[in-house]
Image (tube, rainbow, N blue to C red):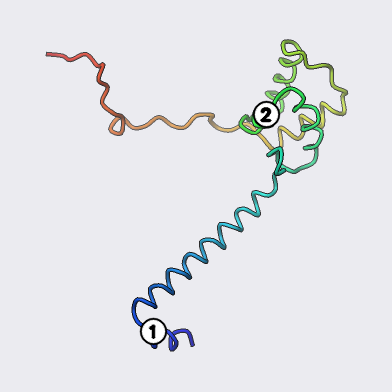
Amino acid sequence: MIQLTLQKFSTMTQVSFIVALTISLVLFFASSENLQAQNSNRVSGLERAEGWQVVQANCTECHSTQLITQNSGSRVVWESRIRWMQETQGLGDLSVEVEESILDYLAENYPQKESGRRPALPLELMPVNPYTPKID
């Protein structure tokens, strides 16, 4: 039926229809990705999972949640960060239950990444260094 209807319209109208359909599909799929992104709390940015409120309540007393969300680590790494904050930054003692909840949450939702840095650019993509000594 669409094919018969399109035959009545000019080529420009057909192109406009195809462009509009394509844009609609792109917007549809983009919105479905946004729905997945809504698993994070809109205010804090923390992933909504068991323990996120404990993390928000305890960790944001001293720093923003961005410091959490931009980092990653194993449970051991997150625990070492808590110890560092306790030893050098004035973080008080946490109850065993609170600390376990925080560590469980962080290790599950912000786990260790393979690499914290992007790979180096290939040499052929690097700009010319104007300070490289010229060899005569």
Residue at which label 1 appears:
9
Residue under the image location 43 percent in, 32 percent down: 119
Is residue 23 toward the left or the right of residue 63 in the image? left
**Pointer 2 or 1: first along the chain:** 1
| Residue 69: quarter of image | top right
Mark whose residue sits in front, 2 or 1: 1
Give the percent coordinates (x, y) of residue 96. 87, 24
Q: Is residue 83 above or below residue 73?
A: above
Disc sitting over residue 127 in the figure: none
Disc 1 secondary structure class: loop
Residue type, mark 2 in image = Ser
Residue at which label 2 appears:
74
Residue under the image location 54 percent in, 61 percent down: 27
Is residue 20 toward the left or the right of residue 113 in the image? left
Residue type, mark 1 in image = Phe
Pick the front one: 20 or 91: 20
Outermost residue on the top side: it is 88
Residue under the image location 87 percent in, 28 percent down: 97
Residue under the image location 68 percent in, 49 percent down: 38
Q: Is residue 84 above or below residue 100?
A: above
Is residue 1 toward the left or the right of residue 63 in the image? left
Pick the front one: 102 or 128: 128
Q: Quarter holding the C terminus?
A: top left
Give the percent coordinates (x, y) of residue 111. 65, 34
Q: How many marks?
A: 2
Disc 2 secondary structure class: loop
Give the percent coordinates (x, y) of residue 31. 60, 58
Q: Is residue 17 above or below residue 114?
A: below
Question: Tag 2: Cα neighbours inside 10 Å, few (<14), some, or many (≥20)?
Answer: some
